Amino acid sequence: MDELKSLTPSDLVVAIFSFDTFVQKGANKVFSPFGKPEGVKAKYVFIRLGISRESFLQGLSTPAQLVYDTIERLHSFKDGSRLSVTNPTGTDITLAIKAFGTCEHRITKDGEMAFLPPFSTNSTFPPY
């Protein structure tokens, strides 16, 4: 940990762990997907556990406007309403919508959090 704290703001820490290392072996006690370890001045990136190379690359190439449009669309669902998702292969799920928040997609200043757009983001929402 002392080595991490000795890094400067121009350094970069990329945290990538297997599920076993992160949960079973305790790396989660130091590293978090939601913020850099206390006292670390370096830039910090946490890569989602179990993400495949394909999903990671798809996330990196997701158009930013698609992400913002999707978030705007999701915010159009009112707290307390219901959303049903069905398809011909048997999916039949009804969700109760509650208030939610999102992390920003882009980092606009040092130290801000951002999320990597999920590979499943798409613009084919069912009509509501």
Image (cartoon, rainbow, N blue to C red):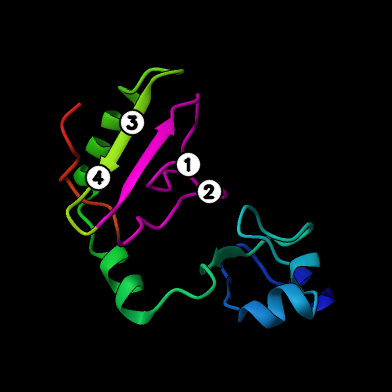
Disc 2 secondary structure class: loop
The residue at which mark 2 appears reads as 113
Find out whether the residues at labels 1 and 3 contact each other: C-beta distance under 8 Å: no
What amino acid type should be assigned to the residue bearing mark 2?
A: Met
Quadrant placement of the N terminus: bottom right
In space, the residues marked 2 and 4 are separated at their CA atoms by 33 Å
Disc 1 secondary structure class: loop
In space, the residues marked 1 and 2 are separated at their CA atoms by 7 Å
Q: Return the disc, 2 or 4, that comes first in the chain's sequence.
A: 4
Q: Find residue 95 and report its image quarter.
A: top left
- Residue 64 screen position, x and y as percent: 24, 48
Residue range highlighted in magenta: 90-119
The residue at which mark 4 appears reads as 86
Q: Return the disc, 1 or 3, that comes first in the chain's sequence.
A: 3
What amino acid type should be assigned to the residue bearing mark 4?
A: Thr
The residue at which mark 3 appears reads as 83
Front one among 87 and 15: 87
Q: In the rendered view, tell whether residue 78 sits above or below residue 43.
A: above
What amino acid type should be assigned to the residue bearing mark 3?
A: Leu
Q: Return the disc, 4 or 1, that comes first in the chain's sequence.
A: 4
The residue at which mark 1 appears reads as 103
Q: Mostly what secondary structure, the magenta segment?
A: loop
Disc 3 secondary structure class: strand
Left or right: residue 46 versus residue 2 is: left
In space, the residues marked 2 and 3 are separated at their CA atoms by 29 Å
Q: Is 91 contained in the magenta span?
A: yes
- Residue 54 screen position, x and y as percent: 30, 78
- Closest to the camera, between mark 4 and mark 1, is 4
